[in-house]
Image (cartoon, rainbow, N blue to C red):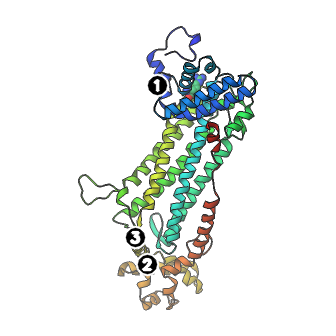
Amino acid sequence: MAQLWGGRFTKETDQLVYQFNASITFDQKLLLQDIEGSIAHVRMLAKQGVLTKGESDRIEAELKNILAQVRQGELEISNDYEDIHSFVEAVLTQRIGDAGKKLHTGRSRNDQVALDFRMYVRMELAQTDALLKELLETILRIMKLHVETIMPGFTHLQKAQPVTLAHHMGAYFEMFRRDRLRMRDIYERMNYCPLGSGALAGTTYPLDRDDTARALGFYGPTRNSMDGVSDRDYVIEFLAALSTIMMHLSRFSEELILWNSNEYQFIEMDDAYSTGSSIMPQKKNPDIAELVRGKTGRVYGALISILTTMKGIPLAYNKDMQEDKELTFDAIDTAKGCLALFNGMLSTIRFRKEQMRKSAALGFTNATDAADYLVNHGVPFRDAHGIVGKIVLYCLEHHCSIDEMPLDALQAVSPVFEEDIYEAIAMETCVNKRLTIGGPGKEAMEQVIAMEEQYLEESAFPCEDWEKALLA
Ligand code: ARG
């Protein structure tokens, strides 16, 4: 296959070398961005008098045609070309002749791929944000339904204090809300256009970098051409943010797997998100949650891979950087797939309120409140802690919960206890007394839910209309 750079070479590239060097099998994912970038570039070249309007129009029309034909399956992206940039340029030139050869004026594949990949990541930031938003909507729906659903809160996986399902879900709401903030934050830093950086040292043609940057929806051009072609920070940041999303999904999955177990029975997963066993007829396995937990490692792998690839690269472009794509594509598809499936799974879960409540009641989750009762009656906290410890021992020996202990048994441990202790350590009291903002108490929870609702209404990712405008 003739190469874009064949002129200086005397031997054909060996087939294995060719395959090792080529990236077309994966960078064809950048077709849309490549064509958009080229359209903005030729329009600008015409405005600057580097190409004629006629040449630019012909190139633009044929680029759009190529995109449409590939999308409709009429034109196949062939592995005979080294990469997607070569493919587009070769097809263009075959079709419109010399005008096609002018597309690459004032441009290098180095700034071209830097642009394409940046636009791809930018689009994926927006899509990931949208998936996160949908997940937040599901979580909030569950929160609203369960401000009174009492369950045990855990530390060390031991029952600690009673909370509500709304409160527990609210913790995940915060995690995924921060994940969305990260999408926006990365966007703000990366939305600058590298086109015009050339191979590394800019170009002698009178390019208008502001024009192409604006046409492609960027805030402006990047400020250093060597950095423009060799910066992949935004990929690293995105993969780090995706890793964090996966870490959150994985923790959530782990909890749902536990809750779905026979021992907990807090939830029942929908049949659609469970699978059976080939040998044990009684089984209903939470495979989807397990796969989400498992795929987390894969996304972390992509992050570690690019960090390692980038660490030894001198300025500016080096071919190592071609390794930025495959694992990133995989990580993005993996994380987006997990977000969508997890959302489906979560929204079909049946929560077993009675079981949660029973678990909280039988786990001494009101022991702290029993101690607080004593403190409120003048007993020093350390002494109160010891008294309640003895009460827990009594309950363990008698197989009962604290509120099932007769008053005389309580008074035998401490005469401070009165009839009103039962009210003070009722699960509802324990939860609803915790009213500082961020706590599980019903009023505090309802306040937070209102805040989250407003947040969901107001938060929107910057729109992508520039893409439609370019291809119109
Ligand atoms: N396929 C290449 C990549 O992804 C495109 C840039 C090629 N540039 C070069 N100087 N060989 O990095």
Q: Is 55 or 234 nearer to us in this picture?
A: 55
300 relative to 270 in the view: left or right: right
Ligand 1's quadrant is top right
Secondary structure type for disc 3: loop
Secondary structure type for disc 2: helix
Residue pushed farthest top?
10
- The residue under the point 52% across, 84% down is 424
On the question of residue 271 being in view, the answer is: yes
The C terminus: image quadrant: top right
Q: Amino acid at mark 1?
A: Ser
Q: Which mark is residue 130?
A: none
- Say whether disc 3 or disc 1 marks the residue closer to the N-terminus: 1
Q: Which residue is mark 2?
A: 392
Q: Is 259 or 198 nearer to us in this picture?
A: 198
Rendering quarter of residue 466: top right
| Cα separation between marks 3 and 1 | 55 Å
Q: Is 367 or 301 nearer to us in this picture?
A: 301
Q: Which residue is mark 1?
A: 78
Q: Which residue is mark 3?
A: 352
Secondary structure type for disc 1: loop
263 relative to 133 in the view: left or right: left
| Cα separation between marks 1 and 2 | 73 Å
Q: Which percent across, then down, holds residue 309?
A: 55, 32
